[in-house]
Amino acid sequence: MDNTSIKENIRKIRKERKMTQEEMADMLGISITAYRDLERGGTSIMNGNVLRLAELLNTSTEEIVLGYRPIQMPGRKLEEMKAEYSARIESLEKENEYLRKLVKSLEETIATKTQIIEMLQK
């Protein structure tokens, strides 16, 4: 996403919120001329300004940068998902360890049987 698209997104969101350029300039603590330059593309937008604009426009930085809000999974918070996946990973690691031990045991059994067969063939 280029700087021009970000500026268009800012303008679109500002208008959706029925805010004027003057109101945005006041909230940002800059002159109306500086804000107009920002929306026109005469001023570069820094990362910190994107965060501040998101706060002022009551939106996400994703909406400002991408032009849309990413889809959220209803009813599930990121922390809940992390906990669920962490528990599942831990369970799989334990199962994996058990299977490694089982394979090692079976390999030892095969080696023993191979030695017995070799001895019987002599």
Image (cartoon, rainbow, N blue to C red):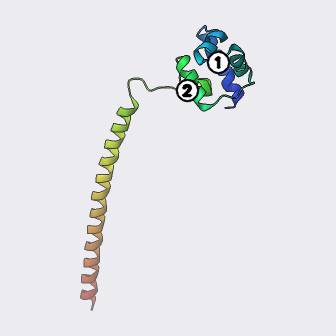
User: Residue 23: x and y, percent?
Assistant: 61, 10
At a point 53% along the width and 27% down the height, the residue shown is 70
Q: Is residue 87 above or below residue 102?
A: above
| 121 lies left or right of 15 | left
Out of 66 and 58, give the one closest to the viewer: 58
Residue type, mark 1 in image:
Ile
| 63 lies left or right of 40 | left
Residue type, mark 2 in image:
Leu
Give the mark toward the camera: 1 or 2: 1
Where disc 1 sits, the SS reads: loop
| 81 lies left or right of 109 | right
Q: Residues within 10 Å of mark 2 (few under 14, many from 20)?
A: some
User: Residue 1: x and y, percent?
Assistant: 67, 32
At a point 27% along the width and 63% down the height, the residue shown is 101
Dot 1 or dot 2, earlier in sequence: 1
Q: Which mark is residue 51?
A: 2
Q: Which mark is residue 30?
A: 1
At a point 32% along the width and 49% down the height, the residue shown is 92
Q: Is residue 84 above or below residue 11?
A: below
Where disc 2 sits, the SS reads: helix
Out of 73 and 66, give the one closest to the viewer: 66
Instruction: Kindly indicate the quadrant of the structure image that contains residue 73.
Output: top left
At a point 67% along the width and 16% down the height, the residue shown is 31
